[in-house]
């Protein structure tokens, strides 16, 4: 009687991700775990972003660890927000799986498409504890009339 080798949890997880990628790619045309959150050739990371809107503003919160406030470069147009920020110390990551590789990232860079037309001249930003909050007032077309 031959004994089968028992798979480790990591092997099972890697197989599961492979199956999910394959099914998702067949349905949608893109593998979910291949969304580029970095550009290894440029040594850039895309920061994590949370965005929501109110009646008057679009609020974007961006995670920028290892960044100094004075190094952050922001620019906005009516429908985009661009963020660039070099890191104080390089961020080193090692990938696990069939392609083991180590890489060091030197900066964060991302362009965000906004859900509404904004007034870039009135944009303001706050940075505290590695979190950047950008408040983008929506462009007002016409005037609000208050009914009494």
Image: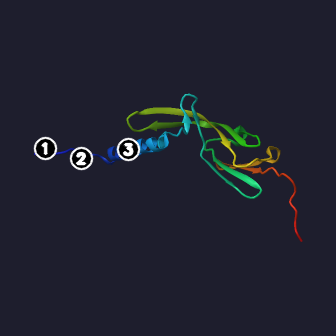
- Tell me whether circle 3 and circle 2 mark residues in contact (CB < 8 Å): no
Q: Residue furthest left?
A: 1
Please indicate whether residue 110 sits to the left or right of residue 135 in the image: left
Where is mark 3, residue-wise? 19
- Percent across and percent down for residue 83 are 68, 39
Q: Nearer the viewer, mark 3 or mark 1?
A: 3
Where is mark 2, residue-wise? 6
Please indicate whether residue 136 sits to the left or right of residue 86 in the image: right
Identify which residue, 88 or 121, lies in the foreground. Answer: 121
Circle 3 crowding by C-alpha within 10 Å: few under 14, some 14–19, many from 20: few
Please indicate whether residue 72 sits to the left or right of residue 46 in the image: right
Please indicate whether residue 36 sits to the left or right of residue 79 in the image: left
- Percent across and percent down for residue 125 are 74, 48
Q: Residue furthest front?
A: 27
Identify which residue, 113 or 147, lies in the foreground. Answer: 147
When the figure is inspected, residue 48 is found, relative to residue 39, above or below; the finding is: below
Tell me which corner region of the image, top left, top right, bottom left or bottom right, holds residue 72.
Answer: top right
Q: Residue at x 65, y 50 (%)?
A: 129
Q: Residue at x 39, y 42 (%)?
A: 18
Disc ID at residue 15: none
Secondary structure category for the residue under label 1: loop
Q: CA distance from mark 3 to mark 2?
A: 19 Å
When the figure is inspected, residue 116 is found, relative to residue 41, above or below; the finding is: below
Q: Nearer the viewer, mark 3 or mark 2?
A: 3
Where is mark 1, residue-wise? 2
Secondary structure category for the residue under label 3: helix
Tell me the quadrant of the picture where the C terminus can be found.
bottom right
Circle 1 crowding by C-alpha within 10 Å: few under 14, some 14–19, many from 20: few
Q: CA distance from mark 3 to mark 1?
A: 28 Å
Q: Earlier in the sequence, mark 3 or mark 2?
A: 2
């Amino acid at each position: 009687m031959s004994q089968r080798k028992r798979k480790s949890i990591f092997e099972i997880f890697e197989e599961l991700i492979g199956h999910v990628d394959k099914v998702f790619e067949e349905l949608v045309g893109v593998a979910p775990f291949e969304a580029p959150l970095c550009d290894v050739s440029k040594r850039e990371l895309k920061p994590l972003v949370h965005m929501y809107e109110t009646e008057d503003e679009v609020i974007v919160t961006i995670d920028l660890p290892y960044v100094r406030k004075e190094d952050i470069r922001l620019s906005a147009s009516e429908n985009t927000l661009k963020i660039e920020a070099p890191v104080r110390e390089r961020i080193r990551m090692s990938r696990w799986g069939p392609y083991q590789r180590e890489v060091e990232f030197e900066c964060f860079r991302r362009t965000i498409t906004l859900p509404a037309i904004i007034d870039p001249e009135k944009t303001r930003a706050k940075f505290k504890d590695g979190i950047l909050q950008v408040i983008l007032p929506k462009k007002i077309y016409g005037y609000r009339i208050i009914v009494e």
